[in-house]
Image: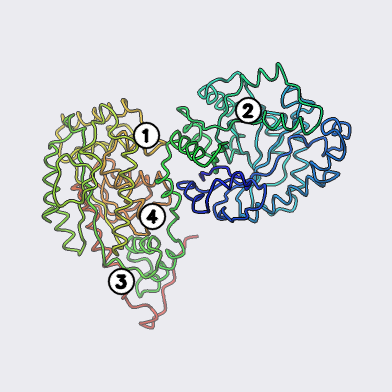
Amino acid sequence: MKIMFNLTTSSEDLDRFQDRKDLLELMHGLDGVELMQFEEDSREIIPKDRVIGFHMGYFPCWLDFWNGNEDALIKEFDNRETVEQVYSGKDRSAILNRYKRELQWAHHYGAEYVVFHVSESTIEESFTWKYQHTDEEVIDGTIELLNELFRDEDGGIALLVENLWQPGLTFTRPEMTKRLLEGIQYPNKGIMLDTGHLLHTNTAIRTQEAGLQYIHGLLDDHGELCKYIRGVHLNQSLTGEYCEETIKNPPYLGATYGERYGKMFWHAFAVDKHQPFTCDGVDKLIRRISPEYLTFEFISADSTEHRACLDAQLEALRVDRDLNAVLAAIRPADQNIFEACEHRFDIIAKPVGSLGKLENLIERVAAASGTVDVDISKKCVLVFCADNGVLAQGVAQSTHEVTTAIGRSLVRGTTSVNAMAKACGAEVFPVDMGMVDKTEGLLDRSIRCGTNDISQGPAMSRKEAIKAILTGIELVGQRAGEGYSLIATGEAGIGNTTTSSAILSVLLDKPVAEVTGRGSGLTDEGLLRKQCAIERAIQTNMPDREDIIDVLAKLGGFDIAAMTGAFLGGAIYHVPIIMDGFISGVAALCAVRLCPAVAGYILPSHVSAEPAGRMLMEEMGFAPMIHGDLRLGEGTGAVALMPLLDMAVSVYRHAATFEDIQVEAYEKWKSN
């Protein structure tokens, strides 16, 4: 989903910004803008590559001009001269030419879609709501217009029709929505659903909550037609009371078209205020629709007010600007490089594919790194240390003092992962993400001294979860900047198999007992306590499985959140990240759920001995190399993969090819 805000090229809009940098700052964490062209962008403030959508202009009263209804036109505009001034021409070709020019602008900016209002209303009708034209008439006229307008388009740009509350596409009558969509011959089409406009179709609505319920009802009514909703203009205007009063007592509009138009202009703003939609549940509405494009369409006085509107809407949707900027920047691993690396293995003098999964792992390393010149000589493991409040429920044999002891051993270089890393030439970087006891020598990125008890409430705030994720991203970026080309993930924190099982139970919708193991060696009684604590945590917090940050914040730990960030960081900085066991795997799943493309940057190492270890692998489609019943943690399983990768890279880089030994290459077997 691409998230943007509305912008026009009017000097009133663009003068809010000192320069392009000022506008880009407002765009931070968003994908770009949906643009409406009023005049030239003479200062070149708008970056073309950030224009995602293009909103076409709108003639409120156009159907009579299209159909050549002279009497109705004179009644609306007073005289023929004004008619021709408004439409810049004498007949329907003027409207077509206007929209053709706008299509040219949309192509100029490289927009992915255009928006077209499907509506009709005279000035008087906008006050009285007594309309001369029916939905059918407006929709049929629109079909005729759009089929002519898009007749020569190649289908590259999407046409999204927008609902209003006047006759046309109101999205209150499914049969009319279907009539419009079936009538438009252009194949690349859909709906831009404007939530504010929908609320105007029911003047009895007085609260955002009631409006949200109303929208869900209309979506229910539309059933399968909802698949055509490709974009959402998100805003709200609770102006039903004003509309009802104006309908009951319409004002005197004036003797001339100019006077009437001036009254209508301000009336439109009084009805359609375009304010942030911020009530609880608006995020669920967007997830239900799952649009390709989400535009925050607000009316504001200046850039400060516009930023406040954007921030309020982002908060309601639980979207963080910084994290969203990261997710938007992630691109899939390079498939062309994967295939080039695969070809290199195929020409080495050996049976094709005979190194099995090792070949695939090196191909994944190449694709993630963005080069066929695979070099993993400089590698490290990040060990994220944190304590968990749920220990108070007796879910582990140990207390937080053991986390402290492990932290000290990591600093001294005496833990299992230290020994294994030394053996394969990898550095160990232990990080304090939230330990109860401060330990000198650890990289201090502590969010807080331990999480809260998840069985009693959220482990952390949403902001803390995001901060931990961003910290993990930052740490990968720092290591990448230092030349590390392969990073393993590890953790240390008593109680983190409890938090991991809680997260996995929710994300996979599995019973707690199926995903919960004995951790470091619980008795039957201890295992039961652990399972009960997880069940209470889920019941108490009611995490939203569609909102990964919500699940992490309510059930996770600072270590898991930071590891989630580490996997995201791998995709940002093009560094392959080795996944360790169960806890690391849960973090990897969180990262993949946040951004599926991240999967291409993850290297599975082993199947954990925890009960859900195999479930995790199947969920992410991974086939790990090592099946050794490992369950130590610290990143030991991930580091165990490193020597195997080193050997595979050595073959990749140094082994003779069929050409070198003057032997005909084996043919690659392909199934029918």
Q: Secondary structure at mark 1?
A: loop
Location of residue 248 in the rendering, given as x and y in whole percent from the top left corner: 70, 16
Q: Which residue is mark 3?
A: 651
Which corner quadrant of the image does residue 549 belong to? Answer: top left
Q: Disc 1 or disc 4, which is closer to the eye?
A: 4
Say whether marks 4 and 2 touch (CB < 8 Å).
Answer: no
Q: Residue at x 66, y 39 (%)?
A: 161
- Residue 115 versus residue 236 in the image, above or below: below
Q: Secondary structure at mark 4?
A: helix
Q: Which mark is residue 571?
A: 4
The disc, 2 or 3, on the residue closer to the chain's N-terminal end is 2
Location of residue 655 in the rendering, given as x and y in whole percent from the top left corner: 31, 75
The disc, 1 or 3, on the residue closer to the chain's N-terminal end is 1
Say whether marks 1 and 2 touch (CB < 8 Å).
Answer: no
Q: Nearer the viewer, residue 231 or 224?
A: 231
Q: CA distance from mark 1 to mark 2?
A: 46 Å
Q: Which mark is residue 509?
A: 1
Q: CA distance from mark 1 to mark 3?
A: 42 Å
Label 4: how many Cα within 10 Å (few below 14, some 14–19, many 20+): many
The disc, 1 or 2, on the residue closer to the chain's N-terminal end is 2
Q: Amino acid at mark 4?
A: Ala
Label 1: how many Cα within 10 Å (few below 14, some 14–19, many 20+): few
